[in-house]
Amino acid sequence: MAYQTLTVEIDDNVALIRLNRPEALNALNSQLMQELGDALTEADRNEKVRCIVLTGSDKAFAAGADIKEMSSKSFVDVYTENLFGDEVDRITATRKPIIAAVAGYALGGGCELAMACDFIICADNAKFGQPEINLGVIAGIGGTQRLTRFVGKSKSMEMHLTGRFMDSAEAERSGLVSRVVPAAKLIPEAVAAARKIAEKSQIAVMAAKEAVNRAYETTLSEGLLFERRNFQAMFATEDQKEGMSAFLEKREPQFRDR
Ligand code: CO8
């Protein structure tokens, strides 16, 4: 499918989706969010895709929701449209892993979009923030909830109340990103991580993703039970037999997603 606000390249089982509205630092408008949802659905259904990398430009992952598009809307408009609500649900409903590769600004909805992915690798020039407070509003697609879970109440509260940005070192220190890499290596590093995931059993990858995400949705005892049942369920797969046999036979496993 051809998109106007993003590009999709599929290579070696990895779909690389690049947000592409350079004139607005990849600000998220309705068209971009719709196209992103479509691209993710398509990647999820495409058998050649086993992992997804979502990125922006060197200057901006995304500088937030599009303020020009939003500015004249009323409460009734955003309530009835459920602005971006359905689109964000499509991101979190994606079953294949999504790595956010963040360079430059990830602000407001941009930071929230990165956090809706499965993990974030960032460039050393990345800047994260929830500056909606400067516009007289608050985060609207997960910032108050997800950032708090990532970095804790104190830091999250400060960022939401003051609008200050967090640099890449602070983002790594506080657990917002899995790691920081030099800006020039961001895409190669993110794609290499995606390729590594693509080599695994897709059943185990999906089960691991579901189990980790469960940690955010439930109590510890329910989460542990969910994990244990799914661990046990892996023993019904051929990939478990193959993975363990390959280890014992000192060879590389050949997973078949069965
Ligand atoms: N929306 C629309 N246009 C934008 C946005 C944005 N969020 N950010 C930047 N742009 C545009 C600028 O207007 C400018 O366009 P033009 O050249 O036509 O004037 C162009 O991008 C370049 O931007 P700057 O000239 O400002 O570039 P600088 O390098 O000087 O500054 C900044 C970069 C610091 C990123 C600055 O652009 C900025 O502060 N942007 C706004 C950041 C922000 O406030 N983001 C939060 C937006 S609100 C939000 O995300 C709510 C999320 C929840 C939505 C839920 C919906 C229900």
Image: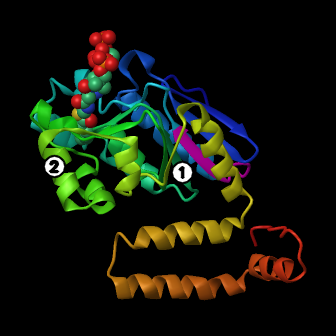
Query: Looking at numbered disc 1 in the image, what kind of residue is underneath it?
Result: Ile
Quadrant in which ligand 1 is drawn: top left
Part of the protein shown in magenta:
47-54
Q: Is residue 88 visible?
A: no
Query: Does ligand 1 reach within 8 Å of label 2's beta carbon?
Result: no
Lower position in the chain sequence, tag 1 or tag 2: 1
Residue at 61% from the left image edge and 88% from the top image edge = 232
User: Given contact means CB atoms under 8 Å apart, are the residues at marks 1 and 2 in contact?
Assistant: no
Callout 1 secondary element: strand
Residue at 42% from the left image edge and 72% from the top image edge = 214
Q: Which residue is mark 1?
A: 98
Callout 2 secondary element: helix
Q: How is the image coloured?
A: rainbow
Q: Which dot marks residue 158?
A: 2
Q: Nearer the viewer, mark 1 or mark 2?
A: 2
Decide if residue 215 is on the left or right side of residue 16: left
Q: In the rendered image of this protein, does residue 234 appear above or below residue 25?
A: below
Residue at 76% from the left image edge and 44% from the top image edge = 12
Residue 77 at x, y percent in the picture: 17, 35
Residue at 12% from the left image edge and 45% from the top image edge = 161
> Hey, which quadrant is residue 217 in on the image?
bottom left
**Viewer-side residue, 98 vs 37:** 98
Query: Looking at numbered disc 2 in the image, what kind of residue is underneath it?
Result: Glu
Q: Which dot marks residue 244?
A: none
Residue 210 colored magenta? no
Q: In the rendered image of this protein, does residue 227 appear above or below residue 133?
A: below
Residue 221 at x, y percent in the picture: 37, 88
Query: Does ligand 1 reach within 8 Å of label 1's beta carbon?
Result: no
Residue 53 colored magenta? yes
| Placement of the C terminus among the 4 image quadrants | bottom right
